[in-house]
Amino acid sequence: MSASFAFVFPGQGSQSLGMLTAMETRHPLVRATFAEASEALGYDMWMLVQQGPEDRLNQTDKTQPAILCASIALWRLWQAEGGHRPAYVAGHSLGEYSALVAAGSLEFAQAIKLVERRGQLMQDAVSAGAGAMAAILGLEDQDVLTACSEAAQGEVVSAVNFNAPGQVVIAGNAAAVDRAITLCKARGAKRAVALPVSVPSHCELMRPAAERFAESIESLNWQVPAIPVIQNVNASISSTVDELKQSVLAQLYSPVRWVETIQLLADKGMSQLVECGPGKVLAGLNKRCVKGIETHGLDTPDAFAAAQAVLA
């Protein structure tokens, strides 16, 4: 009988200094996973995550490997402690790479290098200060889309993360994002706030990064996932490796369809989810996407034990 729960993996914004400290103290497998990442990257990942400096951890090309590493450390621990295999996996933005590693589609050491490269290309695609992102709260999706369309004026601004009903993130050229914020407020948004990020993810400004990233994607030995992966671009399951790779590439400049992802999991009978990574960002979003869905964390000893007890 297959498990009736799914694993979801968080993306950027879930990192924090000191993450997984309590887990590492009890479980050598956590430090061993970070050591493997450190060897692949050429710097001490555990020291960066524990001691910072924070502004270095928050650089896109450092954040992405750090979150992937933390997520896979918890995934490995779940397996080592006898946890059942989930029926499905999905990841939010960067988290999709964690999902692909968990599903056996990518090797961990390769994925760590891949997401470092992804972060570098994203950083290089838009000069500092030229791009921006903002969270729009309390507005219908269609109103956000219309505001972006009106605000563009020859520049780029679009809805890039459909995170939960009434929570959409927009991204693009800084001036166009400012105009869209103003228009969203005029349409009745409860809040429209600029996000402290250096890269306008998942919008058309990232297409040049995707073109350069294609070579890195093609250079790896991809496998058909052993666990179905629901991908961001289409909120569906790719049936071939080629589809998988195309969706991963398109993800750089396409919206994250998280609401539809969680709805699909619910449609497939998944009422229990596990957030496999640092923080609780996805738990907050998931319960707003589908009523009655429960998300368990793994990033502290108490949370891990509670998830084991429920899903044993």
Image (spheres, rainbow, N blue to C red):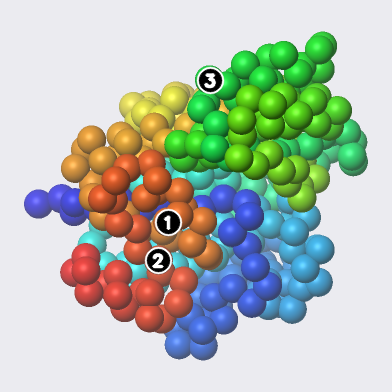
Please identify, in this view, whether the residue under mark 3 or under mark 1 is nearer the observer: 3
Pointer 3 or 1: first along the chain? 3
Give SS at disc 2.
strand
For label 2, the crowd category at 10 Å Cα-Cα, with few meaning under 14, some 14 to 19 and many 20 or more, is: many
Name the amino acid type tagged 3. Answer: Gln
> Is 212 in front, or is 296?
296
Q: Earlier in the sequence, mark 3 or mark 2?
A: 3
Q: Are marks 3 and 1 in contact (CB under 8 Å)?
A: no
Q: Is residue 172 above or below residue 100?
A: above
Q: Is residue 16 left or right of residue 5?
A: right
The answer to whether the residue labelled 1 contacts the one labelled 2, judged by CB atoms less than 8 Å apart, is yes
Counting residues from the N terminus, which is met first, the one under dot 1 or under dot 2? 1
Query: Residue at point 26% right, 41% down?
Result: 266
Q: Quadrant of the rendered structure where residue 170 is?
A: top right
Residue at screen point 26% across, 72% down: 308
**Front-most of residues 140 and 237:** 140
Instruction: Compute the Cα span from label 1 to label 2.
Output: 8 Å
Q: Position of residue 47 (x, y in %)?
A: 71, 77
- Amino acid type for the residue under numbered disc 1: Ala
- Judge the density around disc 3: few (<14), some (14-19), many (≥20) Cα neighbours within 10 Å: few
In the picture of the structure, the residue carrying the numbered disc 3 is 142
Q: Is residue 217 visible?
A: no
Q: Tag count in the figure? A: 3
Residue carrying label 1: 283
- The residue that mark 2 highlights is 297
Closest to the observer, 157 or 61: 157
Q: Quadrant of the C terminus?
A: bottom left
Q: Amino acid at mark 2?
A: Gly
**Nearest-to-viewer mark from 3 and 2:** 3
Please tell me in which quadrant of the rendered image residue 54 appears. Answer: bottom right
